[in-house]
Amino acid sequence: MEIIQIVGLGLAATILIVVLRGQSPQTAFLISLVTGVFIFIFLLDKISLVIHLLERLSVAAGVEMIFLQTILKIIGIAYIAEFGAQIAKDSGEGAIASKIELAGKILILVLALPIIQRIIELVMGLLPS
């Protein structure tokens, strides 16, 4: 029932933020940031379980580990960029949030290039000469 704990923490923080936002916007922002970090820390063991399961499945399927590592890095970049962008949006900095999202997308594209290259090479190898 972890979700109840997470939702409870989120709702308690939200109520506290709504009450404090008018009097102390800096404190409200810090509560939002700390709540997000606590939720992330709370989920680290679940993330670890998923990573280990994916590693076992890729070994069993004979998938090269470099592909799994790249996909996990891409997922990590997506989550971190989203978290950073949401924090920037919460503090009223939509322009910075957009730049964080753009940076995340570019980094994901850079990481995906070797996989895209490998797929194109495989397709080219299947086509008749």
Image (spheres, grey):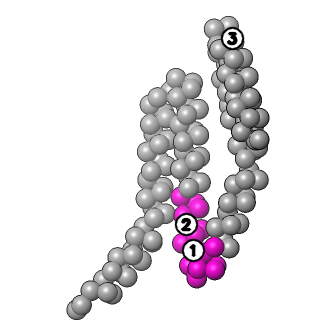
Q: Local crowd at mark 2 within 10 Å, few (<14), some, or many (≥20)?
A: some
Of labels 3 and 2, earlier in sequence is: 3
**Quarter holding the N terminus?**
top right
Q: Which of marks 3 and 2 is in front?
A: 3
Instruction: Report if residue 89 lies within the magenta region.
Output: no
Tags 3 and 1 touching, CB below 8 Å: no
Q: Which residue lies furthest to the left in this view?
A: 129
Q: What element carries label 1?
A: helix
x, y percent for residue 116: 40, 70
Tags 2 and 1 touching, CB below 8 Å: yes
Kind of residue at badge 3:
Val
Query: In which image quadrant can residue 88 be found?
Result: top right
Could you tell me how far apart the alpha carbons at marks 3 and 2 are, in whole angstroms? 43 Å
Q: Local crowd at mark 3 within 10 Å, few (<14), some, or many (≥20)?
A: few
- Reading the image, the residue beneath label 3 is 19
Could you tell me how far apart the alpha carbons at marks 2 and 1 are, in whole angstroms? 6 Å
- Reading the image, the residue beneath label 2 is 70
Q: Residue 66 carries which label?
A: 1
Kind of residue at badge 2:
Thr
Which secondary structure class fits the magenta region best?
helix
Total number of numbered discs in the rendering: 3
Kind of residue at badge 1:
Ile
x, y percent for residue 84: 58, 39
x, y percent for residue 87: 59, 32
Observer able to see residue 128: yes
Instruction: Report if residue 70 lies within the magenta region.
Output: yes
What's the magenta region? 57-74
Q: What element carries label 3?
A: helix
**Quarter holding the C terminus?**
bottom left
